[in-house]
Amino acid sequence: MKKNVLWMLIVFSLVPLLAQEYVEVNFEKNPFATNPSQWKTGGTKNWQWNSGILISGAIENSSETWMEFEANVGDGKFSFGYSISSEKSCDLLIFSIDNQDMFVTSGENQDRLEFSIAITKGQHKFRWLYKKDLTKSEGDDKVHILWIKYPIIASTHSTSFTPTNSTTVSNIRFGLLQYQDNESLFSWGNDDHIVNTFETIFVNGIFEDTQEDITIEPALPAHIFLVNGLSFSLNTKEKKASFSFSFIVGPQYNQAKVFFPIHVKKNTKILKTYNFEAPFDKVDISRRYLQQEKILSSKKFNYASQEELDSFLDKFPDSEFAPVVFRFRLEYCRNFRDEILKKLPAEQEAREKELIKAINVYNEFIKKYPGKLLTRIAIHECFELYTMVGRISFYNNFIQRYPYMEHSLVAKEHIKMLLYSLVCTENTVDAYEKFIQIYPEESFYRTRCIALAQQKAIEEEQNQIDQILKKALAKNTVPSIQPLIEENTRNKRANAILSEIYKIIEEYNKMQVSEKVQKYLTDNRIERITQIIRTVYPDTSAMSAILLIQRLQDIIQLTQETQKMMQKLHDETLHTMGNYFQTLNNDLKKNFQSVEDRLTQINQNINSLHEHLNAVHLDIQKRFDNVDQKLEKINADVQNINQKLDIIDNRLQDIDKKVQEGFAQVNKKLDTGMEKIGTYFQTLHGDLENINQGMLKLDNGLAQLNTQNKEFLRQNAQIYTQLEKMNSLYAGYQKYDSSSDLKCSIGNTVGNLLELGVSSIPVAGPILSKVAAPVLGWLGNKVTDGASALWNKIF
C-alpha cells in the first residue's frame, strides 16, 4: 500500500476578517421546502416557487398573501430584485423589517427592479406582503421576487481574553501537521468505490507558560471526524501542556482548506479561542472522484454518462471542475439531439415523437440546473427543437415552462404567424375577425387580416346581391319594371346591412364610457359595413347614414389626436419635473454630505466612548472575579455549617429514639396497672354485692319503712359509683395510709351516711336511729376495713 507523508506547519490565524461578506440567494431550489425554518409563507394563499422565482399567491379582492425570511445578519445593506404587475395605488407590495414598513410599490412594471436598505447587525425578520383592495384587478395581478442579498456576520478568529490571578495562557508554540495520503486505499464493500475517507490529518501542539490545569477542545465542523481522540498532557514543572489529535475528512466536505476553532478551557469556561487553518489543496475530493477507478469493473469516470455527470454535480456543485463537468452534461444533451436528428423520419407524427424525446432531455437538464449561463444556452437550443415541431400547442408549452425568457416572446410571434396562416387558409370573415380579437394591438398581421376581411366581406356581399337580383328579376320579366325592382332590392339590402351598424351602436350604449372608447378604437365592424355600402351600394339611400357614420369616424380620429397631444404635454411635464427633481436631488446630496460628516464625527465620539466602556468592562470583570473568590469562601463556610448541622441532626435522632423507648416502657407499666385496677374493682364489686344483700335483709326487717330504704339504696349506689370513678387512687391511698384520722373519718362518714339515711325517715327515724346505731356502726367499720384492704391490695 502506497503512503505519502507530508509535514506542514499549523496556521493559527488570529487576525479578524475586515471585508464585509454578502450572501446572495437566487432561489435555484424551493426555499419553502429546503429551508422551512427560515422561509415561511401564509395568508389567503401561499407564495409559490417556480424556476428560480418566488411568486405571490393567486388571491382575490380583499385578501392578502405573505412570505417571511428570518436570519442573523451583519451590518450592511439588504437588497432584493422584484417585478410587479397590479392595479396602481390599490393592490400593493409592502416590504417590512421587524414589523416596520420600509417600502411600498404598485402598478404595472414588468422590468426587473432592485430595492436596497441599510440593515444593522442582529436577528431580523424580513416580510413581503401583497395586499389587494375591494375593487377590480389589473395586469397580471402578481409580484415576483427574483433574488435577495444580505450581509453575513464577519467570522471572529480570536476572542478577547483577560488573564486572571489564577490562570495564565500566554501563547501556543506551533506544532506540526502531518498528512497521511490514502490515495491507494480502496474499499471492497461499498459498491466497488474508493473509501469514503480520503485523508487522515495529525495535529500536535504545545501550550507555553501555563500555570493551571487547563484543557483544549477542537470544535469540528460537519463532515470532519476525530480518528484518535484528544491526548492532553500537563507539565506543571515546566509550565507547559502538550496535546495531539487526528481527524479525517468525509467526502461531503468540499472546501479547499480545513478550518475550525480550538478552545482553551478551564472546566466549562472558554478562556481563549484559536483558529486552526490548514491548506487542503492537495486533497481535491472532486478530482479524486473523477480519477477514481472501480476495482471490480476497472472502469474510469464516464464523461458521456448522464447518471455519472449528474452524480458528480450533485456531490461537488462548487468544485473547480464543476464548470467542465457541466459542459459535458450539456454536450450529452447535444449528442442525444444530434442522434435524433440524424435518424429523423419523414412522417410527421413519428417525426414529432422523436423530437419530443430530445426536447424532454433538454427540459430535464434545464429544470435540474436553473440559473446558469449554459442553462440559457440549453434553453435556446431547446427552443430550436420546438420550432422544428412548429405546432401552436408546443409553443404554448414552451411559454408555460419559460415565461420570463426572451424566447417566449419569439414563441408568441411564431404562434401569431401560425394562426395567421390558418386564418388565411380558412379565408372567412369570422376567422379574420377572431384573429383581430385575439391580437388587438397594431401589427402587420392585424392590418392584413382587416384588409382581407374587408375584401372577403365585399366579395360575399356582391355575390349575395347578385343572387337576390337574379331571383327577383326572374319572377318579373317586364323590361320597364325591372329597373325599379333592382333599385328597390338594392335599397332594401343596403338598409338591412345598415341596420347592423345600429345594432352595434346599441351594443356600445350598454357599455361603460372607458370600455366604449376602447371598443371604438379597436372594433372594425362599422368600418367594414361602411365600406361594403360604399363599394356595393353607392347609389342607395343608405349613403346618407354612411355620411353620419363618417362624422363619427372623424370624432374618433379627433379623439386620437387629442390623446396624442395630451401624451406629449404629459411627457413635457415629466421632463420639466425631472429637471426640478434633479436639482432638488443635488441639493439633498449636499445636505446629506454635511449630515454624513456630522455622523462621522459622532461615530468617532462613539468609538472613544466604546474604548472607555471597554476599560470599565475590564475593571468590572476584575471586581466580579474578586466577588467570585469571596463567594467561593462563603460557600466553603456554608459547607462546614452544613456538616455540623448534620452531626446535631444525628444526635437528635438518637435522643428521639431513646425517648420513644422510654415512653413505650411507661405505657407498658400503665397498661399493667390498669389491668390490676380492673381486677380489684371486680373484687370490690363482689364485696359490695354482699353488702347489698345485707341491706336487703335489713329492708325486709323494716318493711314499713320501704320508701325511706329505697332512698338509702340510691345513696349506696352513688357511693359505689364514686368508688368506681376514683382517678387519684394512689394519692388518696397515701393520705389515707399516713393519717389514722382519715381512716376514722371514712368510717364515721359511712356511719353518718347510714345514720342520716335512717334518721331521715319520718316519725320512725329518731327511733330507728337509736335501735340501728350498733348495726350501722358495725356496717361502717366493715366498709372502712374493706376499703383499707382494697387500698393495700392495689398499692
Image (tube, rainbow, N blue to C red):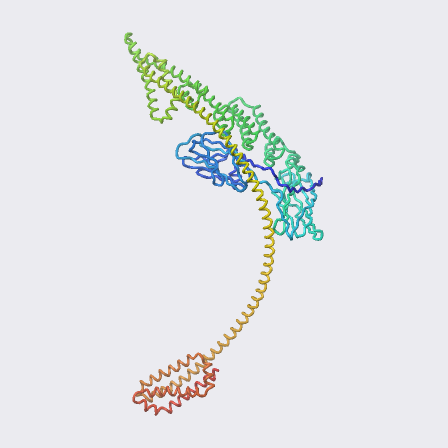
Nearest the eye: 530 or 786? 530
Report the front residue among 734 and 160.
Answer: 160
> Can residue 1 be seen in this snapshot?
no
Q: Is residue 483 visible?
A: yes
Eyeballing the image, is 495 above or below 672?
above
| Picture layout, residue 120 above or below residue 534 | below
| x and y percentages locating residue 767 in the rendered image | 32, 91
Report x, y in % for residue 539.
33, 11
* Viewer-nearest residue: 48 or 92: 92
Task: Establish if 771 lies above or below 187.
Answer: below
Residue 759 picture quarter: bottom left
How many marks overall? 0
Left or right: residue 267 versus residue 503 is: right
Quadrant of the drawing holding the N terminus: top right
Rendering quarter of residue 707: bottom left
Rendered view: 210 above or below 128: below
Q: Position of residue 684 (x, y in %)?
A: 43, 83
**Viewer-closest of 103 and 82:** 103
| Residue 62 spot, x, y in % from top left | 40, 36
Instruction: Kindly give the residue lying farthest to the top in the view shown.
Output: 479
